[in-house]
Image (cartoon, rainbow, N blue to C red):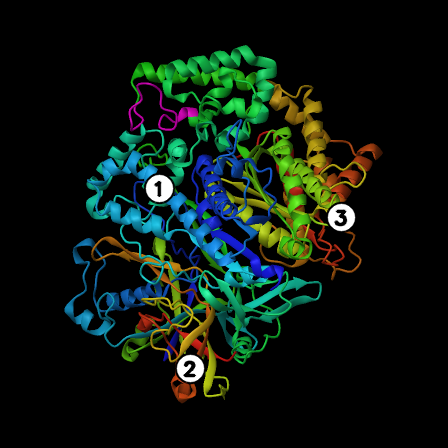
């Protein structure tokens, strides 16, 4: 009997089907945390019956200690345990079965808590609500385990079959579907087209039970989405500690973090009195604890609903209802006047500090070829991962971001736009160093999405997964970062590079961010003040005199398209110009750049030299920079590098 | 059987299961392609019904008895039979049919193109399913299932148990997804109407790429379809139709199945989605298929539903086995001929579901 015979490979899914189907950041966090918690329950069970966890290294894991009721201090609120792990036990099959049972039990406990607190009382006016609830709760999780080598688990994933299926196949879901998880029926059981009134009555009563803030009026959810949504408020009963998830910031809040810092630094009193005024007009908008998590302090300005920092939502009475605003958004004269007062106040803040960005960043990272490394180096990988995971929250915080999940080799975080690429790079350096310390070479890849707050959260998460797996890892190779910009109107650009191509070897800066900063600083210097939007018009005029207009970026894209002979540009497409003999693309782009300057500025030698440098840098970030396993020569060019610089350099970008 | 070549006039929209109600803001809906056979067969039948005098207004939702006699009603197709839909593209050799890449085809892209392997049942592993031969292969470290499409020649190689030559065609080379925003305008204020804003993902096929749907049982009505332009999928977006006859029977290829020690080993590769009332586990039989399942490469279920316009309610979302899925089976060799004849499994096969190709392992 070999040591492998005692090994258990354990996994819980569906990961994306559970986490990614989210409408609010709280759903996203809740999904990540719950999955991590359930995995922890399986680990705790294996340890309880004398087994041990081999990968990951859980000895110092706070979440597992709390699950095992050995935790002290602040209870955990970030998931730190991965959904798959490797363990050993004397009778591995018995231990694995027991672990799977414990997961089902823990999930049922959480589901029952949500049922008792929020659903039971409403179920009698639903149509087969209890039946739908049971069906979905019982059949959701896919728990796989194999005994022996890790390859067995890889093979098991090929066959999505479960002995536990009640009907011998996945469930049939009738009626109307969940507005978040579309494969599942919403639990009222009514069909809107024929029983719309009954359906509405069900959800209205449900909202009354929850206090009205947890569910939007157009949300009709399945059991799984409801458990994710309501879990934070039952966590004390369901898992034994309070997860404090009401302090979870929205995407809009994360987008505004750099702006908050500048407002508090320069106009704290004005900002706080705006918040006091807003709170006196709308009592429900206080978000206590959010700022404490991010800034470690709690000015009133930092603790209101993020919609109140942005002028468009503030004009929308349904999105930012004040006391006296009806459900339909109608407002009597005095409420309208109050709203106008708030708008004026916010305008004053904008005049002093500029506007907050409507874009935030979603960062997803995942170690490369971890399976192979674990097979080869086993416990050393566990220790390296544990060392890496310990520092992730700190790096994200330093970059003003919020960590959603960090377990094993996975990271999920939300960040303000201007810090996101640097944060990703610092994490990749930390990852490589952690492995170096244990004598291994390892890389991590990143998918980074810059998204307007208008883009649905699930689209953002889906894009992050696609660019990480398909664009960064598959297409570009190990140790790559892929970046996508999603505006309200769709995908604006998509760029990919290896870390070595993305970072300056001399200064260790992310090249795109450096370029963007140069372009932005030029603009700010030209205006004489970085925070004086009142001089925007004159600043733009001065800027235009020194810089090529933004049409340069678009013209360059069209030029590359024409030279390549392609018909239509798509975000992320690379142009192969190798067949065009004698073409010096650098000179051509330089001419385009100077041409764009010509109407505004005299082309002196100094201007020409600066332009040459910019164009050289822009081309450098636009060339193919593949991972180490691809030996391509980097001849292809992608126009999106330039578009990304343009996006990052703009202080105010259209949503 | 004749085949309809369906080409989008502009782009198409096939929605997923997300609720899409008038008067509610809905975002990011769509992403289902190729469309289900119910959708394509429904569009063809609706077009034929219109040619027989049916008017699609609210008063006349149901078809007349005469139309039902020819085209059936709901799930009853009378004499109609469909195959597909499949994707095809124009090539130097004419119309090339594309098949979903089998899930047991693993690969990775390296410096010199693709390196691929075919999985087959490996040694027994103890797992949550019992002691089971799970699909595996030597040297697949760093490889993953290759999603996309393969040509007919590549399909034949796979069915013979050979690694296909060339590469898998990624979906991005065949179609792209377009994000589109729609709204209703208030005619008085000319602003966007409250809760009538929606965003969807439309499908735009690359030039020369089409959908292919086989149809039989209405030979005398084919003239109504040839050259027609008809709505297909959501938003009333249109498809132009051309009729063709395929020279080669696309599903007819059978590799040489051999019997060893009284047992014949074969694979079933799903070409179109299949609905099985029970999904077989290790050692079970697939309904209508001789022998038993040894192993399988099966993805998570794809849930297919739709909208029942006659009764104004959503159709149940049913779990289908996704195309590309592969069963590894064994049967007694006296059933060899029955295995050779297999071409469809499960329910709704007359719509085009459950098409399978038989291979060896």
Residue lying farthest right? Answer: A605
Looking at the rendered structure, the secondary structure element under dot 1 is helix
Chain bearing tag 2 is: B
Q: Secondary structure at mark 3?
A: loop
Q: Nearer the viewer, residue A312 or B33?
A: B33
Image point (33%, 42%), residue name? A221
Instruction: Find disc 2 in the rendering and name its residue.
Output: B331
Query: What percent of the width, then of the height, locates residue A162?
Result: 41, 60
Q: Chain of mark 1?
A: A
Say whether residue B335 is magenta.
no
Residue B34 lies in what quarter of the image? Answer: bottom left
Disc 2: CA contacts within 10 A as few (<14), some (14-19) or many (>=20): many
Q: Mark 1 packing: few (<14 Cα in 10 Å), some, or many (20+)?
A: many
Q: Are marks 1 and 3 in contact (CB under 8 Å)?
A: no
Above or below, comparing residue A424 to residue B284 in the picture: above
Q: Is residue A101 visible?
A: yes
Q: Position of residue A412 (x, y in %)?
A: 56, 40
Frontmost residue, A635 versus B242: A635
First to last magenta residue range? A314-330
Mark 2–mark 1 Cα distance, whole angstroms, equals 44 Å
Q: Is residue A322 magenta?
A: yes
Q: Is there CB contact under 8 Å for labels 2 and 1? A: no
The alpha-carbon separation of the residues under discs 3 and 2 comes to 52 Å
Q: Judge left or right: residue B173 versus residue A613.
A: left
User: Residues at marks 3 and 2, common chain?
Assistant: no
Magenta span: chief secondary structure: loop
Query: Which quarter of the picture shows residue A437?
Result: top right
Left or right, A435 with respect to A310, comes to right
Q: For numbered disc 2, what is the local secondary structure?
A: strand
Which residue lies under the disc numbered 1? A111
Residue that carries the numbered disc 3 in the rendered image:
A439
Residue A99 placed where, x, y %? 46, 50
């Amino acid at each position: 009997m070999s040591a492998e015979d005692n090994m258990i490979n354990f996994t819980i899914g569906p990961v994306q089907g559970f986490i990614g189907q989210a409408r609010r950041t709280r759903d996203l966090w809740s999904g990540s945390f719950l999955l991590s918690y359930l995995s922890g329950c399986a680990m705790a069970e294996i340890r309880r019956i004398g087994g041990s966890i081999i990968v990951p290294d859980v000895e110092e894991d706070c979440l597992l200690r709390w699950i095992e009721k050995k935790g002290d201090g602040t209870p955990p609120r970030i998931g730190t345990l991965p959904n798959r792990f490797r363990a050993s036990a004397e009778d591995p099959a018995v231990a694995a079965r027991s672990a799977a049972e414990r997961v089902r039990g823990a999930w049922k406990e959480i589901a029952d808590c949500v049922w008792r607190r929020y659903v039971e009382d409403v179920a009698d006016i639903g149509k087969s609500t209890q039946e739908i609830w049971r069906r979905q709760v019982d059949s959701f999780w896919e728990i796989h385990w194999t005994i022996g080598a890790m390859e067995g688990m890889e093979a098991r994933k090929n066959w999505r079959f479960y002995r536990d299926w009640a009907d011998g196949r996945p469930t049939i879901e009738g009626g109307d579907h969940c507005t978040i998880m579309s494969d599942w029926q919403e639990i009222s059981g009514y069909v809107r087209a024929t029983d719309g009134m009954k359906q509405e009555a069900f959800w209205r009563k449900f909202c009354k039970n929850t206090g009205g803030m947890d569910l939007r009026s157009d949300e009709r959810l399945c059991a799984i989405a409801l458990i994710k949504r309501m879990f934070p408020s039952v966590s004390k009963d369901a898992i034994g500690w309070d997860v404090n998830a009401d302090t979870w910031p929205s995407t809009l809040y994360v987008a505004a973090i750099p702006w908050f810092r500048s407002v508090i630094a320069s106009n704290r009193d004005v900002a706080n009195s705006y918040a006091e005024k807003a709170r006196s007009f709308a009592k429900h908008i206080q978000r206590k604890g959010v700022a404490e998590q991010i800034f470690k302090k709690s000015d009133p300005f930092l603790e209101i609903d993020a919609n109140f920092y942005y002028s468009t939502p503030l004009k929308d009475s349904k999105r930012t209802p004040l006391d006296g605003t009806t459900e339909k958004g109608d407002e009597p004269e005095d409420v309208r006047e109050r709203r106008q007062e708030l708008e004026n106040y916010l305008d004053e803040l904008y005049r002093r500090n500029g506007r907050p960005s409507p874009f935030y960043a979603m960062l997803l990272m995942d170690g490369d070829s971890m399976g192979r490394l674990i097979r080869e180096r086993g416990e050393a990988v566990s220790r390296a991962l544990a060392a890496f995971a310990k520092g992730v929250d700190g790096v994200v915080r330093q970059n003003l971001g919020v960590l959603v999940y960090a377990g094993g080799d996975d990271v999920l975080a939300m960040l303000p736009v201007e810090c996101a690429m640097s944060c990703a790079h610092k994490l990749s350096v930390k990852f490589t160093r952690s492995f170096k310390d244990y004598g291994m070479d390892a890389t991590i890849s990143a998918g980074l999405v810059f998204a307007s707050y208008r883009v649905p959260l699930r689209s953002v998460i889906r894009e992050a997964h696609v660019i990480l797996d398909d664009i960064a890892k598959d297409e570009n190779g190990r140790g790559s970062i892929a970046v996508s910009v999603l505006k309200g109107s769709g995908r604006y650009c998509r760029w990919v590079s290896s870390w070595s191509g993305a970072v300056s070897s001399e200064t260790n800066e992310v090249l795109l961010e450096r370029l963007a900063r140069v372009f932005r600083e030029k603009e700010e210097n030209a205006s004489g003040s970085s925070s004086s939007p009142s001089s925007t018009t004159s600043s733009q005029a001065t800027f235009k005199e020194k810089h090529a207009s933004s049409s340069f970026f678009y013209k360059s894209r069209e030029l590359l398209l024409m030279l390549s002979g392609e018909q239509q540009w798509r975000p992320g497409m690379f142009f192969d110009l190798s067949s065009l003999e004698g073409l010096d693309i650098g000179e051509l782009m330089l001419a385009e750049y100077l041409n764009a300057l010509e109407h505004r500025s005299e082309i002196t030698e100094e201007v020409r030299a600066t332009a040459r440098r910019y164009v050289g840098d822009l081309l450098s970030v636009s060339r193919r920079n593949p991972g180490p396993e691809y030996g391509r020569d980097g001849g292809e060019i992608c126009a999106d590098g330039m578009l990304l610089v343009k996006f990052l350099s703009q202080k105010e970008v259209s949503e | 059987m004749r085949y309809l070549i369906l080409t989008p006039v502009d782009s198409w929209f096939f929605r997923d299961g997300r609720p899409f109600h008038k008067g509610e803001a809905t975002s990011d809906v769509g992403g289902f392609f190729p469309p289900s056979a119910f959708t394509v067969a429904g569009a063809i039948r609706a077009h034929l019904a219109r040619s027989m005098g049916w008017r699609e207004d609210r008063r006349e939702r149901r078809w007349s008895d005469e139309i039902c006699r020819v085209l059936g009603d709901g799930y009853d197709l009378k004499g109609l039979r469909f195959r597909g839909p499949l994707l095809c593209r124009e090539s130097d050799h004419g119309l090339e049919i594309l098949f979903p890449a089998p899930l047991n085809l693993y690969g990775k892209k390296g410096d010199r193109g693709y390196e691929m392997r075919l999985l087959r049942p490996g040694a027994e592993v103890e797992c949550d399913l019992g002691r089971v031969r799970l699909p595996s292969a030597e040297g697949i470290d760093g490889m993953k299932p290759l999603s996309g499409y393969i040509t007919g020649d590549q399909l034949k190689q796979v069915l013979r148990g050979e690694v296909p030559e060339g590469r898998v065609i990624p979906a991005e080379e065949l179609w792209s997804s377009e994000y589109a925003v729609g709204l209703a305008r208030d005619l008085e204020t000319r602003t966007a109407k409250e809760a009538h804003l929606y965003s969807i993902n439309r499908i735009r096929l690359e030039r020369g790429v089409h959908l292919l749907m086989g149809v039989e049982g209405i030979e005398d009505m084919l003239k109504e379809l040839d050259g027609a332009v008809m709505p297909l999928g959501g938003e009333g977006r249109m498809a132009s139709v051309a009729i063709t006859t395929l020279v080669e029977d696309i599903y007819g290829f059978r590799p040489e199945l051999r019997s060893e020690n009284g047992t014949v080993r074969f694979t079933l590769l799903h070409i179109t989605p299949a609905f099985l009332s029970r999904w077989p586990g290790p050692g079970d039989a697939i309904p209508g298929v001789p022998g038993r399942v040894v192993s399988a490469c099966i993805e998570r279920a794809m849930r297919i539903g739709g909208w029942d316009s006659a009764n104004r309610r959503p159709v149940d979302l049913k779990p289908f086995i996704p195309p590309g899925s592969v069963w590894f089976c064994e049967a007694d060799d006296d059933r060899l001929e029955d295995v050779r004849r297999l071409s469809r499994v499960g329910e709704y096969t007359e719509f085009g579901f459950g098409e399978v190709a038989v291979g060896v392992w």
